[in-house]
Image: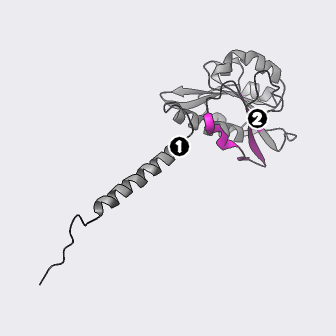
Amino acid sequence: MPSLSLPLHPAGSASITVRLLRCGLLLLLAVLAALPCARADDLPEYRLKAAFVYHFISYTDWPAETAATLNLCLVGGDPFGGEIDGLRGKPVGSRSIEIRRPGAGAELLGCQAVFVAPSAIERLPHLLEALHGHAVLTIADSPGAMRAGVMINMVLVDGRVKFEANLRAARGAGLNLSSRLLHLATEVVQ
């Protein structure tokens, strides 16, 4: 009985391989072009921190008169790159998030949450004084920021993002941080 066999390298297979390689290379370039510009070692940390910021806002009880849009304002150099923009329009109960990047010296009272970047941490006492008594959630990721009065401060511990909470500062602003959130904090100032 004769056997049927196909050649391992049919005519034209080299051109098919070249076309597949070209398509693969084009696909790889398209994926790389779509990634936000950021240093490779910073991207995972701030992608994770952007998710943390969303959860901080989600687990905060806002006064009833708070606007339907929660403005998250970034003060200082933006370490998130495009990562934080992914929060734009995300729901928080019946509200949604908007991202703002006000310039230096801009009024922050239109913000419901403020992230103080490490590049602006020297301005922290002035910012906290300007926001005192207003329902504005303050967030940072700088050593000592929680003790200085920031409500939530993210810290890296063994390469993992953790956070500490200043419940006293939050209550002073008329905000209530969820007990579920506080349970996950590494430190809570009552």
Residue 112 percent coordinates (x, y) = 79, 34
Residue 62: give x, y in percent of width and height.
80, 38
Q: What element does badge 2 sit on?
A: strand
Q: Earlier in the sequence, mark 2 or mark 1?
A: 1
Q: CA distance from mark 2 to mark 1?
A: 41 Å
Q: Say which of marks 2 and 1 sits in front.
A: 1
State the residue lying farthest toward the bottom. Answer: 1
| Position above or below: 59 against 140 | below
Observer-nearest of 44 and 27:
27
Which quarter of the rendering shows the C terminus? top right
Circle 2 is placed at which residue position?
A: 176
- 3 or 116, nearer to the observer: 3
Quarter the N terminus occupies? bottom left
Q: Is residue 102 above or below residue 93?
A: above
Q: Residues within 10 Å of mark 2 (few under 14, many from 20)?
A: some
Q: Which amino acid, by three-letter code, is at mark 1?
A: Ala
- Picture quadrant of residue 119: top right
Residue displayed at 69% across by 15% down: 122
Q: Nearer the viewer, residue 138 or 123?
A: 123
Kindly identify the residue that appears in the image at 70 percent across and 42 percent down.
58
Residue type for callout 2: Asn
**Secondary structure of residue under mark 1:** helix
Q: Position of residue 165 (x, y in %)?
A: 67, 28
Q: Position of residue 70 (x, y in %)?
A: 78, 40
- Asked where in the image residue 116 lies, by quadrant, the reply is top right
Look at mark 1 in the image and give the residue it sits on: 33
Circles 2 and 1: CB distance less than 8 Å?
no
Residue 86 counted in the magenta span: yes
Identity of the residue furthest to the left in this view: 1
Q: Which residues are magenta?
A: 71-100
